[in-house]
Image (cartoon, helix red, strand yellow):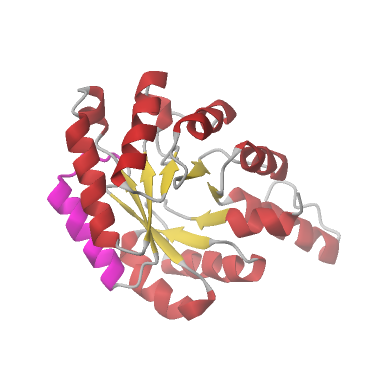
Amino acid sequence: MDRETIFHAVDHTLLTQCATWGEIQQICDDAVRYGTASVCIPPSYVAAAKEYVGDRMKVCTVIGFPNGYNTTAAKVFETEDALENGADEIDMVINIGDLRDKRYDRVLEEIRTIKAVCGEHVLKVIIETCLLTEEEKIQMCRLVTEAGADYIKTSTGFSTAGATFDDIRLFARHIGPKVKIKAAGGISSFEDAETFMELGAERLGTSRIVKLAKAEDNHGQTGTDLGGY
């Protein structure tokens, strides 16, 4: 698998609490340079980022992030606001407490509601696999499929662990034919990225892949060892 194929699957991500506008501009520039699928950024930067990149790059943002326990009404408002500000894609976090309480109808209805707001815009549903049992993960494959969301996504990157190969294998066996998979959190090498994609992931939430490419490019230009960059 060539690197261009991997770049095209990457949601180049910066969601840290201390992210500055200058840093957001930098990941936008890098995303355009390497041809990633999108930049995934905090909601407060969506309007400025969309104005900055225009049609050169899709802007993705997060809803109910990172804990997911906002009310549905709050998530709806966040989604509407993000779309009005120019977001192209939405990554929402489920209410994990509702899932663990087996209140599946509430989880299903919330995803359906957010997807209705998104319309033709892509909706990815973050289920935070590191906090779930295998049974709960399988249940979420069913609910995401029934709700009509576009992607099921492993992780926020803000909990105890990120994507695993086993989770992608599990998703691939249990999602419906119209649902795609996004692996996110802890993807730290091109080899990992390739494996995730071979297992069925069509998107990768990561910042490291582009950083690795930049370090290699800079190394080639300057002869300086940037392996720790």
Residue 34 image point, x, y percent: 66, 65
The answer to whether residue 211 is seen in the rendering is no
Can residue 78 be found in the magenta stretch? yes
Query: Based on the displayed image, in which of its 4 quarters is residue 197 positioned?
Result: top right
- Asked whether 212 or 221 is in front, the reply is 212
Q: Is residue 148 left or right of residue 30?
A: left
| 99 up-or-down from 26: above or below | above
Residue at the spot x=46%, y=80% of the render? 54
Residue sitting at the far front: 177
Question: What residue appears at the point 54 percent right and 64 percent down from the top-left corner?
Answer: 27
Residue 114, given in percent of the width and then of the height, sits at: 24, 53
Residue 30 within the magenta-colored segment of the rendering = no
| Horizontal and vertical percent position of residue 136 | 35, 24
Assign the magenta stretch its main secondary structure: helix
Q: Is residue 82 above or below residue 174?
A: below
In which quarter of the view is residue 140 placed? top left
116 or 219, nearer to the observer: 116
Left or right: 113, with 171 as reference point: left
Span highlighted in magenta in the image: 67-84
Residue drawn 77% across and 62% down? 217
Query: In the picture provided, is 55 more to the left or to the right than 191?
Result: left
Q: Nearer the viewer, residue 41 or 17?
A: 41
